[in-house]
Image: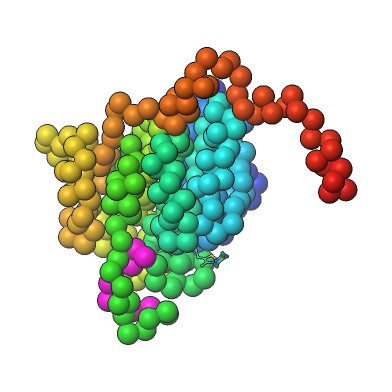
Amino acid sequence: MAQVSDYNTTIEPNWCPGCGNFALWNSLKQALAEMGKEPNEVVITYDIGCAGNMADKLNSYGFKSLHGRTVPVATAIKIANPDLTVISTGGDGGIMEEGVTHLMWAARSNYNITVIMHNNQRFGLTTGQQTVTTKKGEPGKTAPGGIVEESITPAHVALISKATFVARGFAGDPVQLVKLMKAAVKHKGFSFLEILQPCVTFNKVNTFQWFQERVYKLEDKKNYNPSDWDKAFDIAKDVEERIATGILYQDKKSVPYSEKLTYRKNRKTTPIQEVKQYSIKGFIEEFE
Ligand SMILES: Cc1ncc(C[n+]2csc(CCOP(=O)(O)OP(=O)(O)O)c2C)c(N)n1
Ligand code: SF4
Ligand SMILES: [Mg+2]
């Protein structure tokens, strides 16, 4: 039975003291251990950025992708070997901006992967420039007079892209984070989990305290029905006054991509097993 310590590596995190990434990292290890997943059953793909710097601090199979490419790498791994639990992680810059079309296409295909987006509303690693999730008007390095573009709500992008599971957590509530991560991984189909992750160094607006004064849990709300897409879209709108966390939307009847492929219906083998019957010797020799 996997323990949290099985997911540790010998490398110490180098995030700034107090960064929201610490809670996210600990919660992910906790969630995987609680689900009884062994590190060799899990693949995590990483983006570039402070979020991506988790890559060598979590002991599982992993792939550090190019900026914005964490989602397609995860998708390819899952298609090749559906027996693996595949989690794609990255920042708001990587997933919602540079790689947003990858997110949209993976969602509409309903690949059975989990996307965890660290949303610090900044390009953290490159010292805090505004991203697509930064509130309109906020000053920053790339627009000292205030960003003039409208900001994008990540849950809306996931919802309009037909994601079958959309949730939002907060790095200040690791207990809820573990629950949401487990629910996202268990969901059959594409799951998108946005985590409000304060960047204590470069985002002096959306601090832990700022979120603590605004977040509430949908599970505490009487009669909230996560199967109601319109309601989910509506409730996701407010990212300034009262910010909903929890499972915003879930289609419990979701059929993942792999199960929709009729030609694979009765196959007992996975694509990764099947491809082994073809020799790649000649192909390799061409590059030698
Ligand atoms: C293709 C490409 N574009 C831009 C960069 C420069 N770059 C490196 S990290 C980064 C910011 C990442 O921001 P985000 O994805 O939000 O992650 P965070 O650092 O905030 O966790 C950028 C723009 C890059 N490495 N590669
Ligand atoms: S710059 Fe921000 S996101 Fe990056 S490690 Fe520091 S506090 Fe965390
Ligand atoms: Mg970011």
Q: For this view, does 29 lie left or right of residue 182?
A: right
Q: Where is residue 153 in the image (x, y as percent from the top left)?
A: 29, 57
Q: Where is residue 285 in the image (x, y as percent from the top left)?
A: 87, 43
Asked whether the viewer can see residue 259, the reply is yes
Tell me which corner region of the image, top left, top right, bottom left or bottom right, holds residue 131. Answer: bottom left
Q: Nearer the viewer, residue 153 or 9?
A: 153
The main secondary structure of the magenta stretch is loop
Residue at screen point 42% across, 80% down: 141
Residue at screen point 59% across, 57% down: 66
Residue at screen point 28% across, 52% down: 156
Tell me which corner region of the image, top left, top right, bottom left or bottom right, holds residue 81. Answer: top right
In the image as oriented, which residue stretches furthest toward the front?
A: 263
Q: Is residue 138 above or below residue 10?
A: below
Residue at screen point 73% across, 27% down: 276
Q: Position of residue 47 (x, y in %)?
A: 54, 54
Q: The N terminus lies in which quarter of the figure? A: top right
Q: Is-magenta flag for residue 45?
A: no
**Magenta segment boundaries in residue numbering:** 132-140
